[in-house]
Image (cartoon, rainbow, N blue to C red):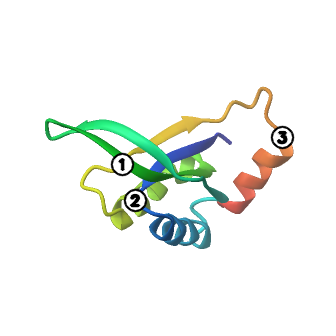
């Protein structure tokens, strides 16, 4: 089993929470960590932007990552949402925690 984290950002805590609950309820994520507000600085359509966003870390399996990505994209209000998959290394990770992710997403 390969565990991954899907990193996303949301415009506010309510939309982050709603999608996180849907992902866990559907068994697509074992857990979603909704982090505190951050400021993102980026270029969009030629203009420099600075926006407050809410980052979320979804813990899932590689097998469920595509379906989770599709759920996130279907619920996201942005035209081009950030959804990035980051592998979780087995080395240095708590094996019991990785097993819990797998069991929660099966």
Q: CA separation, marks 1 and 3?
A: 37 Å
Per the image, the residue denoted by label 3 is: 95
Q: Decide: marks 1, 2 in contact (CB < 8 A)?
A: yes
Q: Determine whether 87 is above or below 66 in the image.
A: above
Q: Quadrant of the N terminus?
A: top right
Pair 2/3: label in front: 2
Q: Determine whether 3 is above or below 19 in the image.
A: above
Classify mark 1: helix, strand or loop.
strand
First reached walking from the N terminus: tag 1 or tag 2: 2
Q: Is residue 32 left or right of residue 8?
A: right
Name the residue rendered at 71%, 61% in the picture: 104
Q: Decide: marks 1, 3 in contact (CB < 8 A)?
A: no
Q: Position of residue 98 (x, y in %)?
A: 76, 45
First reached walking from the N terminus: tag 2 or tag 3: 2
Residue 61 visible to an observer of this rendering: yes
Answer few, some or many: residues within 10 Å of disc 1's Cα (few below 14, many 20 plus, some between 14 and 19). Answer: few
Per the image, the residue denoted by label 2 is: 11
């Amino acid at each position: 089993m390969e565990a991954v984290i899907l990193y996303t950002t949301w415009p506010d805590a309510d939309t982050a929470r709603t999608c996180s609950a849907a992902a866990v309820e559907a068994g697509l994520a074992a857990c979603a960590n909704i982090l505190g507000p951050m400021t993102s600085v980026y270029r969009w359509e030629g203009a420099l932007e600075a926006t407050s966003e809410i980052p979320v870390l979804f813990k899932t399996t590689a097998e469920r990552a595509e379906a989770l990505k599709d759920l996130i994209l279907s619920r996201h209000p942005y035209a081009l949402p950030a959804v990035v998959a980051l592998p979780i290394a087995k080395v240095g990770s708590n094996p019991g925690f990785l097993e819990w992710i797998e069991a929660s997403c099966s």
